[in-house]
Amino acid sequence: MTFWGGGHFAAGQAPLMERLNASIGFDQRLWRQDIAGSKAHATMLAAQGIITDADRDQILQGLAQIEEEIAQGRFAFKAELEDIHFNVESRLTDLIGEPGRRLHTARSRNDQVATDFRLFVRDAIDRADQLLSALQAVLIDHAEAEATTVMPGFTHLQTAQPVTLGHHLLAYVEMFGRDRSRFQDARARMNESPLGAAALAGTSFAIDREMTAKALGFDRPAANSLDAVSDRDFALDYLSAASITAVHLSRLAEEIVLWATRQFGFVIVSEAFSTGSSIMPQKRNPDAAELIRGKTGRVVGALVSLLTMLKGLPLTYSKDMQEDKEPLFDTVDTLDLCLETAAAMLREVRFDRAKMAAAAGSGFSTATDLADWCVRSLDLPFRTAHHVAGRAVREAEQRNCGLEDLPLDVLQTIEPRITADVFAILGVDNSVQSRTSFGGTAPTNVKAAVREARARFLERRG
Ligand code: ARG
């Protein structure tokens, strides 16, 4: 006889079926959640008079022992017992006999797995939030130190206008802040208990779903039993928030890779997060950043895999849904590792301020400042001023010099009213200092934004 009864199953399963069917190889990761769910369920069954207090006590004791066995690596997981739910329940019955066989009253593996998996995802969300805030803290510290450091700002990866490095880093702080809020939204939405939905239709026993929900830290029981066992939105929510986070990490990693090239030379990644080449002695490769960028593919892949798995499924549970776990587990491991590594790598980077400043001034990056000066000082319409600055750029290109190196009389051939005052705004430092509009790149803004970001993202919120 099979563990689960199998009253009407005469012949055994094909070995191939066991290989296809067994999930214990991966869902054993849910053991803590599974045991927590069983404890809450048994406690509730006794409180409702569905099992005796004596049975409950034996069940709780047995579960505590199993918890210890698994934690100490002494538990023998068995593929013929399919999954974590059967493995734990079967061991419980071995340990305590008949009371163990009463635990499955008024529940099913369908509400059990939905509960376990939610608890797992909820923990993953909480960890992602912590890791993201640690990453934000590193970026904010750098932003503070680099509030006055100038660098070229890019559009189309072409030099556009000078910006401050602090401002650039704070852009990522905003991105990771939105990622955290996506995880928090997902958490608030998912925090409902499926336990007690049983197989799909609820149960004829007088269970107390509020009680188990509360015991497991859920805000309330899920309202509809059919939805409760078949909903995997919470995993999709996690995976989409994880995908967006991974894409943000990847963009940051790409900038580190680019900036670490000899051609840019903006950043030096520490040896601890670099590798050498087996053949080219001069190489120092920013592998950590490359891997963080590269791992985005599997995270996004997990989201697509789960979306595709779910799309044709009728209500309620189908075994297809067992395929939800591996992509999610892989994503949790990948995202946690990448977030932690990104923070550690960034903590150790050094920025080459001189290189950045030199690059900031190249590419006629203050052409817009020249146009703005003509608007402000000469009352030119902006379109006219744009034309004047464009001609100045052409002149400087021909002379192979910077805008600030053009002699005043040359500038005056373009626009006779230009005065020597203009040179003050053609330097990159003056340029960034003038960008004081709300959200702009001026060092004074960055210093205030650093304080504001610490308060908004890093100080304990109630
Ligand atoms: N191992 C299964 C899963 O991961 C548990 C639920 C099985 N339920 C069932 N009716 N076969 O989805």
Image (cartoon, rainbow, N blue to C red):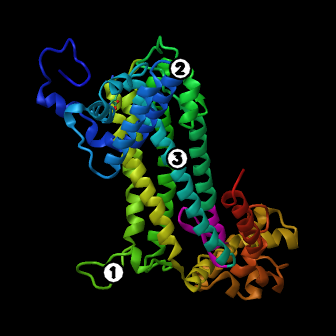
Q: Name the residue under label 2.
A: 48
Q: Is 41 left or right of 192, judged from the image as shown? A: left
Q: Name the residue under label 3.
A: 125
Q: Is residue 360 visible?
A: yes
Q: Give the secondary structure at mark 3.
A: helix
- Image point (60%, 63%), residue name: 136
From mark 2 to mark 3, how far is it between C-alphas?
Answer: 33 Å
Q: Give the secondary structure at mark 2.
A: loop
Is residue 215 placed above or below 285 in the rendered structure? above
- Residue 431 occupies quadrant: bottom right
Q: Where is residue 292 in the image (x, y as percent from the top left)?
A: 41, 61
Mark 2, mark 1: which one is toward the viewer? 2
| Mark carried by residue 233 | none
The magenta stretch spans residue 165? yes
Question: Earlier along the polypeptide chain: callout 2 or callout 3?
Answer: 2
Q: Which residues, given as a range, are shown in magenta?
A: 149-171
Q: Give the secondary structure at mark 1.
A: loop
Question: Earlier along the polypeptide chain: callout 3 or callout 1?
Answer: 3
From mark 3 to mark 1, how far is it between C-alphas?
Answer: 38 Å
Q: Name the residue under label 1.
A: 283
Is residue 200 placed above or below 309 in the rendered structure? above
Q: Position of residue 82 (x, y in %)?
A: 25, 32
- Image point (13%, 30%), residue name: 16
